[in-house]
Amino acid sequence: MRKLTLKEQRLFDLLKQESGRVVLYSELIDILPASGIHTLRQYISRLRQKIEKDPALPDIIITHWGQGYSYEGEE
């Protein structure tokens, strides 16, 4: 895994802490002050580039359209 920025690390930590649960967009946006859904998607995309084997077919951070994201990686 490549080095994460502070905000990427905060997102990753929250998703991992809530492993298997869909973390709502609003919960994730709350940890990225002055951010919206578009910015959140950009952070998730960059995070996937750093942690996924194939970012185009993610199997660690899963999108739940209209809801949020879940962490499905190994502990």
Image: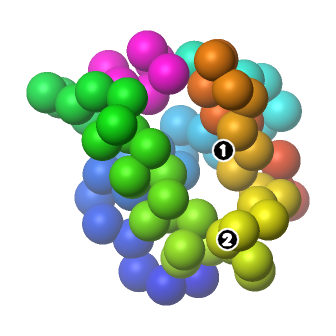
Q: Report the side of 49 relative to 19 (left or right).
A: left
Question: Of the residues under marks 2 and 1, which one precedes in the sequence?
Answer: 1
Residue drawn at x 66%, y 44% is 16
Q: What residue range appears in magenta?
A: 25-31
Q: Quadrant of residue 21?
A: top right
**Neighbourhood count class around disc 2 (C-alpha, 10 Å): few under 14, some 14–19, many 20 upward:** some
Q: Secondary structure at mark 2?
A: loop
Is 63 or 33 nearer to us in this picture? 63
Q: Report the side of 28 relative to 6 (left or right).
A: right
In this view, the residue farthest toward the left is 34
Q: Which mark, residue 55?
A: 2
**Residue that carries the numbered disc 1 in the rendered image:** 16
The quarter of the rendered structure image containing the C terminus is: bottom right
Is residue 60 in sight in this rendering? yes
Q: Secondary structure at mark 1?
A: helix
The quarter of the rendered structure image containing the N terminus is: bottom right
Q: Is 63 one of the magenta-colored residues? A: no
Q: Type of residue at label 1?
A: Lys
Up/down of 43 relative to 4, above or below: above
Is residue 9 in sight in this rendering? no
> Which of labels 2 and 1 is toward the front?
2
Predominant secondary structure, magenta span: helix
Q: Type of residue at label 2?
A: Pro
Q: Residue 60: give x, y in percent of width and height.
A: 77, 57
